[in-house]
Amino acid sequence: MKTLRGINLGSVSFTQHIEFLEKALQALEAKDYKAFQVYFSNHIAIKYPTQKKLDEEVDSDSYKAFKDEIKKWNAQIADNLFDWDIFQEDQQTMQPLKQTFIDLCLETQKQYAKLKHEQEFLDFSDMAHIAYELLKDDMIHAEVTNQYDILLVDEFQDTDDLQESIIESISRGNNVFRVGDLKQSIYGFRMARPDIMKRHMTSTNPNDQTLLMNQNYRSDANIIDFNNSFYEKLMNNGYTERQFDDHDIAYVGTKGQKKENPIPIRFLYTGIWEKMIPCRHVQPKVSTNKIDTMSLPMTCWRNIKRAHVGKICVF
């Protein structure tokens, strides 16, 4: 028996609603969006029964809350529905405009390339593409690959496909050290792909090993707890695939970061219509950290030095 908020949805009063919704779900799973629209529209068109017509006694407030919630869901879905024929007609109407825009982009690219050639300069994108093309030459590839013992890649979460291809092309398979934080990815507009980093983290390749630096030695415990909670909700919003996992949780590094009466974290929103907010209660900057966060990297550098590594390439 299907129930929601204690209301029997198997009641004859809801039979038509359930029938159309089940058909709409089947159409959605089959990716038949036109059929989905028809069934879902039929579901919306049917009025919900009054409380008196229900087969059982239901509290009026509960039933009203139930209907309001269902109507809210219906509205959210209906806002994304469109008539397929109208969509195709709009596509046909927009085609000349889209083609004009494409032609404009291609001509702009052509003129920009001509200008760079005349003035003999390269932009950042050119350097990456030319480097990748040069590495296709066997002699150049062998020279670059043998020149560096270790490849260090910083801000790896903002690596794009071309950059990853360059790294892979000069890698020996076991000499790349990548550092990144998925929460700090900000270059999606430049084709950065954080999923490249996620792929390496879940790789079964014996040369791929993930080292979690999840001990925070610089922030108070309340800030660390806040960030964990904030990013978990922000990055796992239900609209995209899960992006914040257990390995993304940060932990307090020392007992000294835990305070008996921590200062609460607040967001202060101000505008030209608001009065200046007094900040006398804001605590001044605390003394320096007890543990230098550079200690681990410096140790790594000392180990590298003792290992007599020749040359290191840093990206």
Image (cartoon, rainbow, N blue to C red):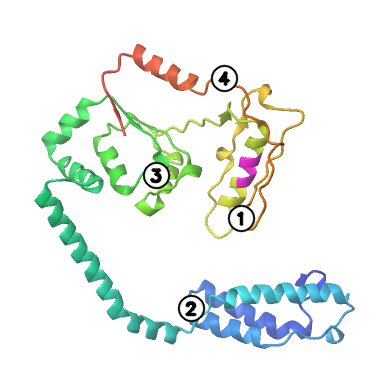
Task: Specify which label sits upstream in the sequence, 2 or 1.
Answer: 2
Residues under labels 3 and 2: Cα distance?
37 Å
Q: Amino acid at mark 1?
A: Gly
Q: Do tag 3 and tag 2 residues touch (Cβ < 8 Å)? A: no
Q: Amino acid at mark 2?
A: Asp
Image quarter hosting the N terminus? bottom right
Which mark is on residue 271? 1
Q: Looking at the image, which residue is at 14% across and 55% down? A: 115
Task: Specify which label sits upstream in the sequence, 3 or 2.
Answer: 2
- Of badges 3 and 2, nearer the viewer stands 3
SS assignment for the magenta stretch, majority: helix
In this picture, which residue range is highlighted in magenta? 226-230
Task: Specify which label sits upstream in the sequence, 4 or 3.
Answer: 3
Give the residue at mark 4: 291
Numbered disc 3: secondary structure: helix
How many marks are shown on the rendered structure?
A: 4
Residues under labels 1 and 4: Cα distance?
39 Å
Q: Looking at the image, which residue is at 68% across and 73% down? A: 72
> What x and y, as percent, mark residue 170?
24, 35
